[in-house]
Amino acid sequence: MALFAVGLLQPAAAGEEATVKVFVAWQGQGHTFQSGPKQATFVGALAGPLYTDTEKGPVHTGTMVCPTMVTIGGEDASQSGIGRCTLTDSNGAEIYAEYTCTGIFLVGCGGDLKLTGGSKRFEGISGGGHVTIRSDTRQFTVITSGVAKGEGTGILFVQELHYKLP
């Protein structure tokens, strides 16, 4: 994703390897379902602009969308989540990633993000890092018993995302 920041029109260098900081200011939508006596499950998507943190501050480097599923414990507010993401630069080149995380509902979810491949100049990309996902606003509207529509905003960040191109 640092490749986004160094010039979207330049081809990626073969064998390039680096570690960068990235974050996404996301907006999310989905539904929360009662999925057990003391458990709920959120199914939805997080999407927003992707930024790479450089020496001169954050640079907008693309967009991200992550279909996401989070299971929430009703007694202790524990949560565990999974997601599969597509990061896209302005030329349509994509990086694919997946994450797993655990944490406390409405506090944050931390875990691992793994780069699983890419298209065009990112074909064959690999790597990953520790991901943290936090929400800062959220609104739930009850649709029917056991089902609520949810909307929110937050941040997804990876302090040390290591990547390698073949």
Image (tube, helix red, strand yellow):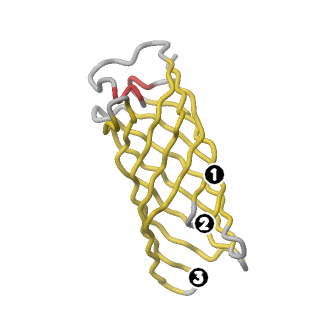
Secondary structure, mark 1, is strand
Upstream in sequence: badge 3 or badge 2 = 2
Tell me the amino acid under the disc marked 1.
Cys
User: Where the N terminus falls, by quadrant?
Assistant: top left
**Front residue of this view, candidates 4 and 154:** 154
Tell me the amino acid under the disc marked 2.
Phe
Q: Residue at x 52, y 31 (%)?
A: 117
- Label of residue 123 in the image: none
Contact between labelled residues 2 and 3, with CB atoms less than 8 Å apart = no
Q: Relative to 33, is 15 above or below?
A: above
Tell me the amino acid under the disc marked 3.
Gly
Q: Residues within 10 Å of mark 1 (few under 14, many from 20)?
A: many
Q: Disc 3 and disc 1: Cα gap in Å?
A: 24 Å
Q: Which residue extends farthest bottom?
A: 145
Q: Residue at x 46, y 24 (%)?
A: 123
Q: Relative to 53, is 8 above or below?
A: above
Secondary structure, mark 2, is loop
Secondary structure, mark 3, is loop
Identify the residue under disc 3. 146
Q: Residue at x 46, y 75 (%)?
A: 149
Identify the residue under disc 2. 105
Q: Relative to 162, is 108 above or below?
A: below
Q: Which residue extends farthest top?
A: 14
Contact between labelled residues 2 and 1, with CB atoms less than 8 Å apart = no
Identify the residue under disc 1. 101
Frontmost of labels 3 and 1 is 1
The answer to whether 162 appears left or right of 151 in the picture is: right
Q: Disc 3 and disc 2: Cα gap in Å?
A: 18 Å
